[in-house]
Image (cartoon, grey):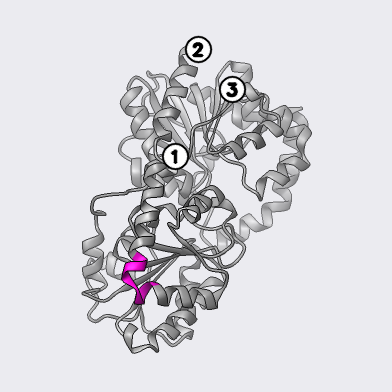
């Protein structure tokens, strides 16, 4: 089986290679970490047993924060190795843990590469955030008697049908997984449908609820307010936006500004992907709106001389600070069919949160928020305008939505300890 899998990988790499070269040249991606991707991964404390935690990208790295803190506290004799697939994911992991944990790129799942990685890491357990089960990884772990645990497990409406198309392979692969800790009953049933034994699947809730900050000041938010010269002006934040959305948002903002009541309103646009920062800057300029790039202020540690109507949040790791300053938040990648960005963070901070209809990557969270009137779903640009106007004109209405959303987040917290307890049980059983 491994030879068939390796052949499929090599063919896929050949097909995908032009895109890799394009991104290396045009987007400055995939230029580092090749030795790690080829399995040469170094630990910091090879004298300790190791928990290998894999978080694909920024979202998974952020979701793992409370888990890592709890593992370090309750399993201090274990080293934690954190791997990520994407450049942005690894950058976020380094920003959080560079001085504390070994951080690496995830190795390719070619059998020879993965075998090298296992021989160097020698994990006591492999913890995979959300879904990232790979055939050779699963097979090598089984052969070596190393438990593989899916943490915060989810199979989205988009990924589930794809896996079902190759059900023979997924059944072979998922039967090698020791335990799946799923976010919801629906996701648990999907893992079982794809081949996980029912006895190996349990529901623990979503770790993202635990990582969401529901009280206290956001560090750096006050300084951000000074740097963008916010003053007493209300701020509308569009966070985690995607292609096609910024034009809608800028059009809505211009219409809002036509009302004298909203003359002092300012807008912060924070695209989800850094390679789009320049593109969005050009869109703002084309819209005829004065703006400032936050990266310039941050790099020079200075403040804006005046208060331009639009701020482009073209840095990584500062989205929560912008949310903390907002009076109304629109969560991006939801007006166009991209599955959504994380709406937990603004809701947890007690912000009146709006999003569009395309939220399949956050279906459970959206359902929980809408059921309790803790957020507002808008269908299109016109409805975004109307609902944003209502939230700005009626502070009591916006505050009620915000309070309900924050209560939903608090009610759903607690997955971290359930997850750690399950990991401890597996480690104990495995000796």
Disc marking residue 429: 2
> In this view of the protein, which residue sits in the foreground, 296 or 408?
408
| Residue with the most extreme top position | 431
Instruction: Say whether residue 240 is visible.
Output: no
The quadrant of the rendering that contains the N terminus is top right
Classed neighbour count for the residue bearing mark 2: other residues with Cα under 10 Å, few (<14), some (14–19), many (≥20):
few
**Residue at 22% in and 72% down:** 303
Residue at (49%, 79%) from the top-left corner? 283
Query: At which x and y percent is residue 391?
Result: 38, 72
Residue at horizontal 32 percent and vertical 85 percent from the top: 261
Can you tell which mark lies on residue 178? 3
Dominant secondary structure, magenta: helix
Q: For the residue labelled by badge 2, is the local secondary structure a helix, a strand or a loop?
A: helix
Percent coordinates x, y for residue 218 in the rendering: 26, 54
Q: Quadrant of residue 78?
A: top left
Q: Pick whichever of labels 2 and 1 is earlier in the sequence.
A: 1
Q: Alpha-carbon distance for marks 2 and 1? A: 24 Å
Residue denoted by label 1 = 207
**In front: 377, or 29?**
377
One can see residue 86 in this view: yes
Pointers 3 and 2 in contact (CB under 8 A)?
no
């Amino acid at each position: 089986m491994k030879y068939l899998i390796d052949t499929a990988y090599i063919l896929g790499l050949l097909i995908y290679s032009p895109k890799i070269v394009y991104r290396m040249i045009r987007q400055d991606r995939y230029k580092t970490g090749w030795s790690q991707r080829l399995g040469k991964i170094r630990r910091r404390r090879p004298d300790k047993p190791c928990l290998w935690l894999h978080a694909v990208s920024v979202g998974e790295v952020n979701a793992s924060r409370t888990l890592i803190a709890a593992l370090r506290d309750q399993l201090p004799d274990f080293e934690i190795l954190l791997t990520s697939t994407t450049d942005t994911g690894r950058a976020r992991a380094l920003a959080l843990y560079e001085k504390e944990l070994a951080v690496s790129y995830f190795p390719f799942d070619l059998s020879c590469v993965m075998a090298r990685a296992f021989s160097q890491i020698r994990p006591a357990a492999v913890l995979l955030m959300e879904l990232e089960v790979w055939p050779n990884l699963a097979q090598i772990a089984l052969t070596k008697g190393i438990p593989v645990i899916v943490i915060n497990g989810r199979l989205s409406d988009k990924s589930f049908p794809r896996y079902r198309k190759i059900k023979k392979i997924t059944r072979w692969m998922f039967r090698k997984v020791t335990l799946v800790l799923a976010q919801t009953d629906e996701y648990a049933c999907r893992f079982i449908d794809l081949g996980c034994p029912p006895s190996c699947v349990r529901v623990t809730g979503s770790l993202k609820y635990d990582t969401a900050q529901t009280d206290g000041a956001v560090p750096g938010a006050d300084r951000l307010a000074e740097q963008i010269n916010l003053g007493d002006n209300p701020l509308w934040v569009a966070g985690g936006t995607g292609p096609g959305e910024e034009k809608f948002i800028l059009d809505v903002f211009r219409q809002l500004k036509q009302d004298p009541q909203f003359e002092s309103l300012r807008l912060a646009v924070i695209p989800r992907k850094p390679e789009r920062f320049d593109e969005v800057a050009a869109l703002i300029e084309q819209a005829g709106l004065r703006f400032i790039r936050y990266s310039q202020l941050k790099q020079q540690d200075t403040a804006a001389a005046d208060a331009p109507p639009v701020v482009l949040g073209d840095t990584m790791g500062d989205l929560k600070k912008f949310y903390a300053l907002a009076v109304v938040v629109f969560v991006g990648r939801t007006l166009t069919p991209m599955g959504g960005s994380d709406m937990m963070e603004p809701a947890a901070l007690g912000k009146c949160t709006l999003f569009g209809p395309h939220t399949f990557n956050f279906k459970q969270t959206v359902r929980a928020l809408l059921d309790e009137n803790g957020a507002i779903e808008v269908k299109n640009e016109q409805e975004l305008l109307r609902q944003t106007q209502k939230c700005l004109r009626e502070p009591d209405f916006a505050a009620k939505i915000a309070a309900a959303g924050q209560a939903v987040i608090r009610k759903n917290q607690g997955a971290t300890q359930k997850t750690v307890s399950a990991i401890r049980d597996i480690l104990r059983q495995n000796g």
